[in-house]
Amino acid sequence: MTQAQVRPWEAAHTPSTFTFIVVDGVDAGTKFVLDGKQPTRVFVGQGPACEIRLHDVEVSRRHVALEPTPEGVRVSDLGSTNGTFIDRVRVIEAILQGDEVMQVGSTLLRVERTDGPSTLPPEADRFGRLLGSSAAMRRLYPLCKKIAASQVPVIVEGETGTGKEILAESLHEASPRAQHPFIVFDCTAVPPNLVESELFGHERGAFTGATASRPGVFEQADGGTLLIDEVGDLELSLQPKLLRALERNEVRRVGGSRWHRVDVRIIAATRRDLDREVTAGRFRDDLFHRLSVLHVELPALRHRREDITPLARFFWRELGGENRLAPEGLFARWEQEPWPGNVRELRNAVARQLALGELASTTHRRDGRELNAPATDDPRVDSMETLLAMRLPFTEARDRLAIEFERRFVERTLADHHGNVGQAAAASGIGRRYFEKLRARTR
């Protein structure tokens, strides 16, 4: 099927094209077209990274997001100072059908819908290791191919667990740099006093414990791609040094005097709204401009529910469930869940189901209710007795019990310390990073 061809059923579920016309405000008369093929959300605001940029001083730097969907344009206010209004009603999130008036700041925009649907890119279910055949993902893949072919920096945004690192590695593998290193640096995983050394390297004797010279991640990634994960968490004092490295393509090790030339393609990932971080003074505006030459945003799993069952089936096979049937209705129930942890949380749910079987039904508490609640609500049911009754091989039974112990231990310790991860880790006698790993794999 060519890109110009659309199946009848697909046309009915394909986003249309919308036009936003400024009818009142400093930008009056300006028109913006939102095509149904738009690969990611479009941002409206004063900020330079916004695709629809307004000059109204009452509009926030990143005010509102617009996303084409089969139902219409999803409008999401981004915590703006003065709010977003649809036909004079303030909204946090809404769906536009056309013929509405949207107000941001003191600017009024009339929304018009075209007659026919836009044509989606050819049907696909993946880009590299990034999976999904929903409309939201299919619109993304052509953009990803173009980004992979380029050499300029790119920011990947998205909620926790949407697959930002997987997309970054897929971009690298589809790029001309694929035969060179792909290095990941997580700004949240390194103590603040060691971040500079990890980024740029250090010379012998630069600080206590520096018994030998060591290259940083920039040098390690020379010729390839460097993913700076959670760049929004980078200490403000280190941001000028990162900016210099990006602008001059050279780094100087801690304690050193010589500059090292590097050839690195930068991908930065963040769960934060960097526009808001800039406004708050926590992220440098010039570094943001340098990183955000290209931008891609991964949709939350709740906005691509048609991918949940295929993803769950894929993880089921990947994690060793080829010869086991999933409980009846399990995937259908998962399609109704909110998945705040997104694809990572879904994968963990599959792993837990395969590891614990019926015991998995007692895990994954959310807001007082349980995912896949067991048939009985009797609190006296002994999970150890249930596990023994399953007559599993020793190693499998032991592993299932260990997973359940870790989950309950983390849950109880966090509850004792009111959700404070640092205090919970200290009380557990383990490092915060290891505690966070336990927490992530038992969700």
Image: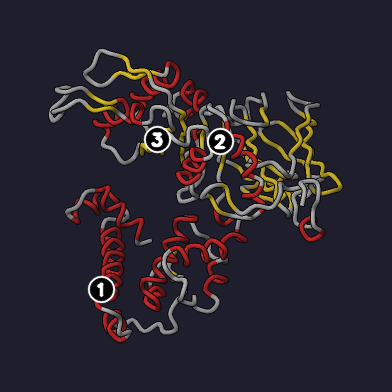
Q: Quadrant of the C terminus?
A: bottom left
Residue drawn at point x = 46 percent, y = 34 percent: 268
Mark 2, residues whose alpha carbon is within 10 Å: few (<14), some, or many (≥20)? many
Mark 1, residues whose alpha carbon is within 10 Å: few (<14), some, or many (≥20)? few
Residue 258 x/y as whole percent: 28, 13
Which image quadrant is residue 31 in?
top right
Front position in the image: 110 or 436: 436
Foreground label between 2 and 3: 3
Which image quadrant is residue 99 in?
top right
Answer left or right for 31 relative to 340. Answer: right
Q: Give the residue pinned by disc 1.
A: 395
Q: How is the image coloured?
A: secondary structure
Answer left or right for 294 relative to 120. Answer: left
Residue type at the position of mark 2: Ala
First in sequence: mark 1 vs mark 3: 3
Instruction: Say if residue 350 shows up in the picture.
Output: yes
* Most distant residue in the right direction: 115
